[in-house]
Each structure stands twice: as structure tokens, then as C-alpha cells.
Image (cartoon, rainbow, N blue to C red):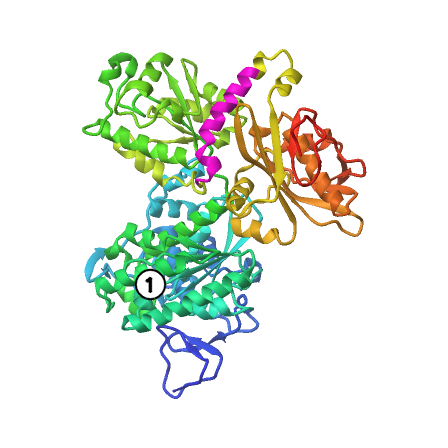
């Protein structure tokens, strides 16, 4: 046979004698035949372009529902159902090639829990073959698993019921949860935004796609998963029109194995690492706002690996230190996924040998789930409050019955589990998650434990607010949400009592009610498995968030005691600063776009890379505030586009933390925005309002501030006569001179 340059013969293909394979073509199958041109990555060919498949029906009928089989293959191959031939098979679909067969096998594992043997993956040429694989008719009674250990074939099992709150899915066994998600075709995707995720890897990575799409979809994201050519990381990073090119992909992921990076010695391996690091740096400069992730280097799992343990350790250290300092490059914890599964369960020697897909179906599934988790963490606001019970949750026993000395809490024995759980809560508090105590108890008993018990990790200063009484906990949670000016969906509720959890779930269904395990030893693990706190970063504001909430409580108490609102505001000594962000504040700017739900004009969620990129096109200003009770921190952000030909300046993004509202801070913010736009020659501010579930307060603000509706969500305000500052606000900004109380610049 003759195989010309630039041609590809797929893994597992059998090329017959005297076959000629021209340049630029992809051939696969047994016997090998033409699949497609290398540069043809389009959808399936129409039946008119290819011969109709001769489909064998060994049993005369499908065992699984034909629509389910068809839907599984369409999803696995990322096909457009409207353009998919009726007689779908490898003969009528160009992307149903050997890589497509791997993707279908992964989808079978994700949907049915069935592992297709490596030798049988390439028998998946029709829907009947897929059906046979699901029913075990393609697979022998036992198969080689890992390194020669025989294991029974997994058969299709019953699907778990999905929890009402899909945020509790990570608490379930991931295999069972994936099967349950795949079985639910009626689950809506909560957003129409498609997120292209492109993976470049040193190994065949396509089998991770089904789980990535399934878990992304159930969390509200339509993920379009794409892959660069096999082992083409440097080329993909440098190609200006390749799959990582700006505008083609939103999230770009680089995954590598130490087995693939090792070049036989440290000198040659260092040269290869230098190439990758240089390509990463050039890609960051060229790709714009797209996110670039690099997987941490996992342990070597291959049975064929020549690496000694010392070589692997050296290589992982070099990878981390060389890439860790690159600006604009983020980490994806690939190593943690492999380590969590374990080396023996992660490897698949037969698949590596036949397909260059070195990992087990379980590892690929977990890898897809982990990538979906990352996508969610950058585009979904983390929960803001943990409302936690006390008796048998923070400590063992009922303090009202056994007293301070009778509860289980300490460094040894049964009380250690509670102390470890408190340590985890403390770490979340330090990342900016507020802690609220919600307990049916005598307040004096609870406070005594927090103040005096030597085993307590949490102290009164760690608690943002308290609700200790004998009311139903759903009522207390609603009161706390009102007091903290937060939505109930910002709360995560932890309580050991199933009856109490059921009461909250029924009467406050927006709250995320965590089904804690029956034993306290499982509390910390359950909390760690949740994705609800992903994205909570420890900025300076986060570290002081509990103190700020306590200061807010003092403000509200004084406001209630004041004779009038004017008297209260006059005595606040309110100081507002508005200016461009400093280098250390970009993380907080991005965080506000991700976490602010109520006072948010456009509901656009952005990463640090995205807000930095926008700063080159739009004016970005931050708002800080303080009064005699304390520092509010950085509480507002606005992005204003330059004026157009009609002298209109559009507000691209406007958001503010709710704890700063109602005291004139938002009015000072508008005065600053107007001054900025007027200074650039604008006569009109345009505010495009995007309606969400909880941002109606922005609409009220626009109306109160004099904006008028122009249709299609656009609101305008003439700034020929600029808005005035409230008299009680001291405004410090290079944009305008204060007209309020003395003390401004």
C-alpha cells in the first residue's frame, strides 16, 4: 500500500494491500476506506453523497428505544439532527469514524454504565451495533480490565431519580448521576448561550465530551466541545486561524501526560517544555478574551511508561514552575482528577495500545465532569450564605439538655468530626462566604458554647448574623434574607434533622437544602463535594465580609433609632470614591460581575481576562465607599463605551453591591458616570436593561433617576444638565468636584 504525506490512517484501521491513500485524506475502518479530507470537519454527508448502509438486524428489532439510540449517537458525534441522515451509520456519516466510535462508546458508558471492550469499539458501525453493545451482545462475559484483572461486564441498571435541586447532583455517585442525566431528555438548558470549549491534548481526549456536555447542560450551559488534532499542542497554540483562535472558542484547554512529554532525558525534555511555554505565552497575547487553561500534570499511569518515579516528579515540578508564572494562563486540576480515581482505575492499557486513548471510561467521565465544573465556576455566582444548625450539626448532642460540658466537640473521639466540620466552615468564611446560625434553642445556651467551649473553631466574630429562637427555620431564613438584602437562592442550609430539612425545602424551596449524611464523619466530605461555593475567591473584600455585615447591622439599628432618614444620613459621614481600578482590584471587578444578581444592569458575567480586555475598549470605573461605621470596600463597577456619532454613551455594565444601596451611593455613582460621559463629549447616557429574575431594582433606579424608556430595553438620560450629588455625600473623584458636604476634592 502507498500512504502519501499529510494523509491520516486512523488508529485500528486495516489497510488492504495495494491500497493508495492520497495526501490530505483521512482513511479508517476495516478494511480501511476514505472518510473525509483532513480539513473537512463539517457535519455528516447527506444520503445522496454516499451509498445507503446495509443495516443488519440480528434480532429483528432494537432492544433499546430507537429514538434513544439515535439521540445518543447524535449527541456523541455533535451532529445537527436536522442534517442527519435517516439511516444513520458509519457509512452515511463522515464523522462516525474511529474517533467517533470512541465518542459513542464513551456515551454508552455515561448513559448506561456499560463499558464497551476495546476490541468491540470498532464494531460500532450502526444503531443496531450500538444497541448490541448496550445489551452486552457485542461483549464477552468477562473482559480484561486494567492490567489483566477479569471483571464482569457492567449491565444497564436502573437510573437514580434526580434531586429536585440539581445543585445536589455532585453529592451522588458520579456514574449513577451521569446515567440519570443522560436518561432525562426533558431537562431544560437554562440558557441559550453556547460555550465553545476546545481541548488540545497529547492523547486522544474525545471520550470526555459526552460527560462534559451532559453535566454542563444540567447546570444550565450549552457546551460545544471541540478537539484539536492529536498531540498538536504547540501547533494549536500558535496557529492564528486554528481552533484556539480568538472568537472561535471561549475556553481553551491544554492537557498533557508526563508519559507523552518525556523525551528520553532531561535535556531533550526541557527543550520540549520550552517550546510549549513559549507557545503558551504567544497564545495569550493573540487570543484576546478567551480563557486559556492548562491541566496540572497528572501522575504517570501507563503500563508502557518508561518513566521512573524520580523522572515523573521532576517533570511535574518543571511543568508547574514554568507555567505557573505565565500571565493569562489558568490551571485546571487534571492531576486531582487522576489522583482521585487512582492509577489502577485510571489506566486502560488495551485502549491506549489500540486507540491512543490511555484512560479508562471512568477517568474520561470524571475529566468531563471536572471541566463542566470549571465552566460553571466561572459563569455562576457562588452561594453567599451558609445557614447552619447547632445541635448535632456544629457539635454533638443537644446543649439545652446536656449543657456546655456535655456536648461532643474536641480534638479526639466523636467530637473530632464536628471540629473538622467547623474548620471547613471557617475556611469558607475566609473565602467570603457568610455564616449564619439558625437554631431552635435558647440564645444564651448557644452563645455560651461559641464563647466558652475550648473545642469551638468558630467564634462569635465568625458569624455574620444570628437567628436563635423557636420559630420554624423556613421563617427564620426568610427573615435573614430580608435582613441581609439577599435572595433565598443565595442560602445553603445545613441541618442534621431530615424533618427540619423537609420543612425548609417545602416552605422555602429557593434555599439549597443539603441532605447531610446520618453520621457527622460525613459532613465535611458532603460540603466539599458541592459546587455551590466554586468561584468564591479570597479577595480583600471577602476576608472582611463578615465584619462588614456586622457593621451593616449596626447601621440598621441606628437607622431605626434615628428620628428621620435625613438625620440618619447626615450623621453617617458617607465618603464615596470613584476612579479606574488598580492592578490589584481586577479580581474584585470580575467577581462583582459574577456574583451581583440584583443591582445588575446587563447580567453579563465576566472573567478577569475578559474585564481586562474590555478596559482597552471602554472606560472602566470602580466605586468605593466608607462611613463612620466602617469601610464598605469596592462596591460598584461601571463600563461605559465611548460616545457614538449621536453623542450617546452606552453603559455596557453597571452593578453595585446591595449593601451600599439606599444611602445616596448609587446617586453619586450616576453623577460620576454622567461626568465621565460628558467629558468625552456625550450628551446622553444609554442604559440597555436586561431583565432577569431578581434585578428589578435596577429598573426602579433608572426610573427614579430620570431615565426614559426608548423600547427594546434601552433607557436614556440627557446629561446636558448633569445629575447633582446628594448633599450628605463627600465625593472623591478625578471626574468632578464635589458639590456635597465639605471634605471632597
The percent coordinates of residue 430 (x first, y second) are 40, 35
The percent coordinates of residue 737 (x first, y second) are 71, 35
Which SS does the magenta portion mostly show? Answer: helix
> Total number of numbered labels?
1
Residue 317 placement: quadrant: bottom left
Quick check: can you spot residue 131?
no
Please say whether residue 540 is one of the residues in the magenta stretch.
yes
Q: Nearer the viewer, residue 171 or 553?
A: 553
The percent coordinates of residue 331 (x first, y second) are 41, 54
The percent coordinates of residue 286 (x first, y second) are 55, 63
Mark 1 neighbour class, 10 Å CA radius: few under 14, some 14 to 19, many 20 or more: many
Q: Is residue 193 left or right of residue 649?
A: left
Figure quadrant of the N terminus: bottom left
Figure quadrant of the C terminus: top right
Please say whether residue 493 is one of the residues in the magenta stretch.
no
Q: Residue at x 49, y 79 (%)?
A: 24
Q: Is residue 37 left or right of residue 349?
A: right
Residue 457 placement: quadrant: top left
Q: Which residue is mark 1?
A: 257
Q: Residue at x 36, y 25 (%)?
A: 495
- Disc 1 secondary structure class: loop
Residue 666 placement: quadrant: top right
Q: Nearer the viewer, residue 82 or 66?
A: 82
Q: Nearer the viewer, residue 614 or 80?
A: 614
The stretch in magenta equals: 538-558
Q: Is residue 99 left or right of residue 299?
A: right
Q: In the image, is residue 368 above or below residue 96? A: above
Amino acid at each position: 500500500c502507498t500512504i502519501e504525506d499529510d494523509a491520516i490512517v486512523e488508529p485500528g484501521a486495516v489497510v488492504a494491500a495495494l491500497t493508495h491513500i492520497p495526501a490530505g485524506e483521512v482513511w479508517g475502518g476495516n478494511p480501511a476506506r476514505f472518510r473525509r479530507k483532513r480539513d473537512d470537519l463539517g457535519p455528516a454527508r447527506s444520503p445522496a453523497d454516499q451509498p445507503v448502509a446495509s443495516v443488519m438486524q440480528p434480532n429483528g428489532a432494537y432492544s433499546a428505544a430507537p429514538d434513544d439510540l439515535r439521540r445518543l449517537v447524535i449527541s456523541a458525534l455533535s451532529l445537527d439532527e436536522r442534517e442527519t441522515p435517516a439511516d444513520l451509520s458509519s457509512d452515511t456519516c463522515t464523522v462516525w469514524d474511529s474517533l467517533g466510535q470512541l465518542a459513542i462508546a464513551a456515551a454508552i458508558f455515561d448513559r448506561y454504565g456499560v463499558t464497551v471492550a476495546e476490541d468491540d469499539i470498532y464494531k460500532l458501525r450502526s444503531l443496531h451495533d450500538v444497541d448490541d453493545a448496550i445489551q452486552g451482545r457485542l461483549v464477552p462475559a468477562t473482559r480484561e480490565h486494567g492490567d489483566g484483572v477479569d471483571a464482569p461486564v457492567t449491565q444497564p441498571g436502573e437510573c437514580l431519580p434526580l434531586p429536585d435541586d440539581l445543585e445536589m447532583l455532585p453529592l451522588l455517585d458520579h456514574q449513577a448521576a451521569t446515567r440519570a442525566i443522560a436518561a432525562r431528555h426533558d431537562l431544560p438548558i437554562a440558557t441559550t448561550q453556547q460555550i465553545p470549549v476546545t481541548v488540545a491534548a497529547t492523547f486522544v481526549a474525545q471520550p470526555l465530551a459526552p460527560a462534559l456536555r451532559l453535566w454542563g447542560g444540567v447546570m444550565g450551559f450549552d457546551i460545544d466541545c471541540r478537539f484539536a488534532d492529536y498531540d498538536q499542542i504547540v501547533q494549536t497554540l500558535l496557529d492564528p486561524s486554528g481552533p484556539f483562535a480568538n472568537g472561535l472558542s471561549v475556553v481553551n484547554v491544554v492537557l498533557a501526560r508526563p508519559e507523552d512529554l518525556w523525551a528520553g532525558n532531561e535535556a531533550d525534555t526541557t527543550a520540549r517544555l520550552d517550546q510549549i511555554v513559549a507557545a503558551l505565552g504567544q497564545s495569550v497575547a493573540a487570543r484576546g478574551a478567551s480563557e486559556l487553561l492548562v491541566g496540572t500534570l497528572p501522575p504517570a499511569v501507563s503500563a508502557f511508561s518508561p518513566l521512573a518515579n524520580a523522572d515523573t516528579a521532576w517533570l511535574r515540578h518543571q511543568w508547574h514552575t514554568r507555567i505557573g508564572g505565565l500571565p493569562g494562563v489558568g490551571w485546571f486540576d487534571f492531576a486531582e482528577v487522576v489522583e482521585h480515581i487512582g492509577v489502577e482505575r485510571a489506566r486502560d492499557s488495551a485502549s491506549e495500545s489500540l486507540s491512543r486513548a490511555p484512560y479508562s471510561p471512568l477517568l474520561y467521565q470524571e475529566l468531563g465532569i471536572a471541566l463542566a465544573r470549571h465552566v460553571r465556576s466561572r459563569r455562576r455566582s457562588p452561594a453567599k450564605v451558609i445557614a447552619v444548625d447547632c445541635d448535632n450539626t456544629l457539635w454533638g448532642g443537644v446543649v439545652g439538655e446536656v449543657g456546655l460540658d456535655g456536648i461532643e466537640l474536641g480534638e479526639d473521639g466523636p467530637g473530632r468530626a464536628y471540629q473538622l466540620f467547623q474548620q471547613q466552615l471557617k475556611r469558607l468564611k475566609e473565602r467570603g462566604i457568610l455564616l449564619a446560625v439558625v437554631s431552635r434553642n435558647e440564645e444564651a445556651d448557644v452563645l455560651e458554647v461559641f464563647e466558652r467551649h475550648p473545642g469551638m473553631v468558630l467564634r462569635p466574630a465568625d458569624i455574620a448574623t444570628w437567628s436563635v429562637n423557636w420559630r420554624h427555620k423556613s421563617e427564620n431564613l426568610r427573615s435573614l434574607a430580608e435582613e441581609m438584602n439577599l435572595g433565598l437562592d443565595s442560602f445553603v442550609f445545613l441541618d442534621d434533622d431530615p424533618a427540619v430539612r423537609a420543612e425548609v425545602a417545602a416552605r422555602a424551596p429557593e434555599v439549597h437544602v443539603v441532605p447531610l449524611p446520618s453520621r457527622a464523619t460525613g459532613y465535611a466530605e458532603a460540603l466539599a463535594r458541592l459546587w455551590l461555593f466554586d468561584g468564591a475567591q479570597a479577595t480583600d473584600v471577602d476576608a472582611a465580609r463578615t465584619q462588614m455585615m456586622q457593621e451593616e447591622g449596626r447601621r440598621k439599628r441606628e437607622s431605626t433609632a434615628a428620628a428621620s432618614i435625613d438625620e440618619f444620613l447626615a450623621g453617617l459621614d458617607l465618603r464615596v470614591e470613584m476612579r479606574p481600578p488598580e492592578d490589584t482590584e481586577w479580581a474584585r471587578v470580575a467577581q462583582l460581575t459574577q456574583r451581583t444578581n440584583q443591582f445588575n444592569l446587563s447580567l453579563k458575567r465576566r472573567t478577569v481576562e475578559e474585564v481586562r480586555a474590555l478596559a482597552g475598549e471602554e472606560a472602566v470605573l470602580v466605586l468605593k465607599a466608607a462611613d463612620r461605621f466602617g469601610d464598605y470596600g469596592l462596591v460598584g463597577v461601571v463600563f461605559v463605551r465611548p460616545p457614538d456619532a449621536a453623542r450617546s454613551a452606552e453603559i455596557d455594565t453597571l452593578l453595585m453591591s446591595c449593601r451600599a444601596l439606599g444611602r445616596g451611593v448609587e446617586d453619586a455613582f450616576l453623577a460620576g458616570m454622567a461626568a465621565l460621559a460628558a467629558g468625552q463629549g456625550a450628551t446622553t447616557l444609554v442604559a440597555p436593561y436586561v431583565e432577569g429574575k431578581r434585578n428589578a431594582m435596577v429598573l426602579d433606579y433608572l426610573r427614579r433617576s430620570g431615565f426614559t424608556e426608548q423600547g427594546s430595553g434601552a433607557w436614556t438620560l440627557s446629561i446636558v444638565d448633569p445629575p447633582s450629588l446628594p448633599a450628605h455625600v463627600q465625593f472623591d473623584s478625578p471626574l468632578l468636584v464635589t458639590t456635597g458636604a465639605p471634605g471632597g476634592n
